[in-house]
Image (cartoon, rainbow, N blue to C red):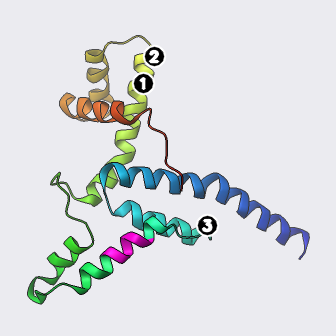
């Protein structure tokens, strides 16, 4: 193996350790918190990308999906049943795709709220400022902040 190949291989392993494993840990945590199956699909994709062993909790989901999919007995409503079999029906009424899409926004709002809080601003001031920065209703901003407050000190689970 030449010097460049060796360096490339070592760099890949370093990136896997710095990006792959923490991302997988975060996805396991998020799935435990909200049950969104897209976190499991993303975990699978990360494992493939970074050549990591696929965790048992991802395989357990795929096992459940395969059993559920093979037990669909109403082929005229197959797409709806398949969606349900794979866990894509949420209790919140929001699509798992929408929930996943909102995560960066919720995170940015929460982090900015923490900054404003550290500057000594009160909750009402923070909500008002955030509603301007992130075009959302104050009620939505408050909902995101409360959700963040509930989880901000949680530790990530082991992979």
Crowdedness of circle 1 by 10 Å Cα count: few (<14), some, many (20+)? some
* Local crowd size for mark 2, using a 10 Å CA cut-off: few (<14), some (14–19), many (≥20): few
Residue at x-position 45% and y-position 55%: 27
Q: Where does the image place residue 87, in percent across and percent down from the top left?
A: 25, 67
Position of residue 17 relative to residue 76, above or below, is above
Label 3: which secondary element: loop
Question: Is 54 located above or below residue 141 in the figure?
Answer: below
Element under disc 1: helix
In the rendered image, residue 35 lying in the magenta stretch gets the answer no
Task: Tell me, yes or no, whether the two marked residues, 2 and 1, touch with CB atoms within 8 Å.
Answer: yes
10 Å neighbourhood of mark 3: few (<14), some, or many (≥20)? some
Residue named by callout 3: 50
Residue 127 is drawn in which quadrant? top left
Looking at the image, which is closer to me, 106 or 132? 106
Q: List x then y, in percent, for residue 147.
A: 30, 36
- At horizontal 66% and vertical 56% (from top left) the residue drawn is 17
Residue 61 magenta? yes
Quadrant showing the N terminus: bottom right
- Residue for point 39% across, 45% down: 104
Q: Position of residue 58 (x, y in %)?
A: 44, 68
Is residue 65 positioned above or below 107 on the image?
A: below
Q: Is residue 66 left or right of residue 23?
A: left
- Between discs 2 and 3, the one toward the N terminus: 3
Q: Nearer the viewer, residue 85 or 80?
A: 85
Q: Earlier in the sequence, mark 3 or mark 1?
A: 3
Disc 1 target residue? 114
Name the element at disc 2. helix
Q: How far apart in space, not on screen, are marks 3 and 1 (Cα)?
A: 33 Å
Magenta residues span: 59-64
Residue nearest the viewer, comparing 50 with 152? 152
Q: Can you tell which quarter of the image residue 113 is in?
A: top left
Residue that carries the numbered disc 2 in the rendered image: 118
């Amino acid at each position: 193996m030449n010097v460049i190949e060796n360096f490339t291989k070592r760099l890949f392993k370093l990136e896997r350790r710095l990006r792959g494993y923490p991302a997988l840990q975060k996805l396991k945590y998020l799935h435990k918190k909200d049950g969104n199956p897209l976190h499991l699909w993303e975990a699978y994709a990360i494992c493939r990308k970074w050549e990591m062993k696929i965790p048992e909790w991802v395989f357990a989901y795929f096992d459940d999906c395969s059993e559920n999919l093979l037990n669909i007995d109403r082929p005229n409503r197959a797409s709806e049943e398949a969606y349900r079999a794979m866990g894509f029906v949420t209790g919140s009424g929001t699509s798992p795709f929408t929930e996943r899409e909102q995560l960066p926004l919720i995170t940015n709002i929460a982090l900015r709220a923490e900054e404003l809080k550290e500057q000594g601003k009160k909750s009402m001031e923070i909500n008002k400022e955030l509603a301007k920065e992130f075009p959302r209703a104050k009620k939505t901003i408050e909902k995101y902040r409360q959700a963040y407050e509930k989880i901000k000190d949680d530790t990530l689970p082991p992979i």
